[in-house]
Amino acid sequence: MSQYDIVIRGGTVVTNTGRFLADVAIAGEQIAAIVAPGTALDAARTIDAAGKHIIPGAVDVHSHHREPGFTHKEDIISVMQACAAGGVTTSFAMPNVQPPPNTVAILDSMIELYNSKSIIDWNINPAGTLPEEIPGLATRGIAAFKVFMVVDTGRSYPHMPGIGVHDHGKLLEIFETIAPTGVPLMVHPHDQQLMSYIEKTFWDRGEHDAQAYAKAYAAYDGIIWDTACALLLRLQKATGTPLHLLHTQSIGVIEQLRRARAAGQDVSAELNPWALFMGNDWNNIVRLGSYALSYYVPEKNTQPLWDALEDGTIDIISTDHGPHTKEEKEPGWTDGWKAHTGTPAAQFYVPMFLGAAVDGKISLERVVDLVATQPAKRFGLGQKGRIEVGCDADIAIANLDTTVEIRDEVVLSKIGYTPYAGQTMHAEIETTLVRGRVVYEGGKVVGQPGWGRQARPTA
Ligand SMILES: [Zn+2]
């Protein structure tokens, strides 16, 4: 029997602080040795990574898996196939499914479902909408709670009634109840009352299409985002609850985050790929309508967002993977409020950001930190997010010497299309390992349902 199960030879290991040539040996589920290239090692299998880059698998803390309840859009197996092909080794599921996991009993049955179907590691963020359930939910190995401040007008999904909270007192109660559990709370920021007025001004002028919808959400330089952020930061300060702020996209939010960090507040902030590769180009919204929306992020925000990623004001990139069928997107051409909002990205965001590093927009080390090291650290996953001896062998091997056009034909997500089709990336994921097992190689998902495990916080 060999001493090691796998050795990855000849690649450049990229960490959040630097890069070096090394061979990486795996025993069982862990990284067992990192040695000089060519060191004699007794391994059952060798993966040749000469000329390639070896990065920690991405930890996506914000993904809409749609199961149970909305499996016509996506399911656990299809989303995890997309993840495996995209270098994602851990993915957190959001609670806008049916029934939503806001009680211990519902969460437990969802955990059972994941145990039997998962290809990669996972966790589930329950909705923290029922304060009496919060202490019990916190005992189930969860890494975060999730609350939406938005309830949709004009449609019942993706922000359905029952899991949205925009009453400020109720939010304070939720923050206060979560605080003693020590579990971070992630929040989709939104100001429903401002939005109700803004929407009405568009509708009164007879403007209903996807372009009107895009402009409404971005109105007054992102006022609905900025005011919600201010409230959330103040609730964080009042209660001490670790806050993870979603959908960072406005200069106003970036400025508030800088002040909160300087004051030592316990806050992390997330950027989603649509804010830099899709919704930040008005031409995409004209061309693709609701297919381009998550949200419209006016162009002047683009450089400040890259700057905030570089200096750590935004410390996490996750997908907000939000697949919807074409039937659910088409109504947007005439009524943007009827189209389901969200864009899929699980399969492409890691290579998109690695490609941006190749293009000089950000450093490779920052990308590794943003997609893997920081999300693992923030959510207590001590075994994940790093290429280090003793860590889980969650690894993506990337080719950064290539040009790949994104095409609908390669989409593994159940919906079978991507709004990013036609974009080119200077990076490609070639191989993905989850806890020492190869789940993607040679252009094929080879991981099997049942291998994935709940990524429980260790710290
Ligand atoms: Zn989301």
Image: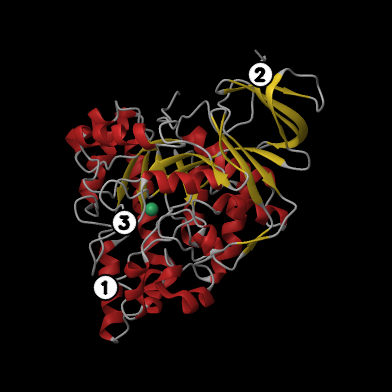
Q: Distance between the residues labelled 1 and 2?
A: 63 Å
The answer to which of 127 and 111 lies nearer the viewer is: 111
- Counting other residues with Cα less than 10 Å from the Cα at mark 2, is it few (<14), some (14-19), or many (20 or more)? some
Percent position (x, y) of residue 306?
61, 57
Q: What residue type is labelled 3?
A: His
Percent position (x, y) of residue 19?
74, 37
Q: What residue type is labelled 1?
A: Tyr
The answer to which of 360 and 329 lies nearer the viewer is: 329
- Counting other residues with Cα less than 10 Å from the Cα at mark 3, is it few (<14), some (14-19), or many (20 or more)? few
- In the picture as drawn, the residue positioned furthest to the right comes out as 38
- Mark 2 and mark 3 lie on one chain; the one further toward the N terminus is 2
- In this rendering, the answer to whether 130 lies above or below 273 is above
**Residue bearing the label numbered 3:** 72
**Residue bearing the label numbered 1:** 197
Instruction: State which quarter of the image contains the N terminus.
Output: top right
448 vs 369, left or right, is left
**Residue bearing the label numbered 2:** 4
Q: Which residue is drawn at 60% across and 31% down?
A: 386
Do labels 1 and 3 touch, CB within 8 Å?
no
Residue 37 occupies which quadrant of the picture?
A: top right
Q: SS at mark 3?
A: loop
Percent position (x, y) of residue 171?
25, 46
**Residue 240 in view of the camera:** no
Q: Which amino acid does label 2 sit on?
A: Tyr
- Counting other residues with Cα less than 10 Å from the Cα at mark 1, is it few (<14), some (14-19), or many (20 or more)? few
The answer to which of 323 and 164 lies nearer the viewer is: 323
- In the picture as drawn, the residue positioned furthest to the left comes out as 132
**Residue 114 in view of the camera:** yes
Q: SS at mark 1?
A: helix
The answer to which of 250 and 127 lies nearer the viewer is: 127
Q: Which of marks 1 and 3 is in front?
A: 3
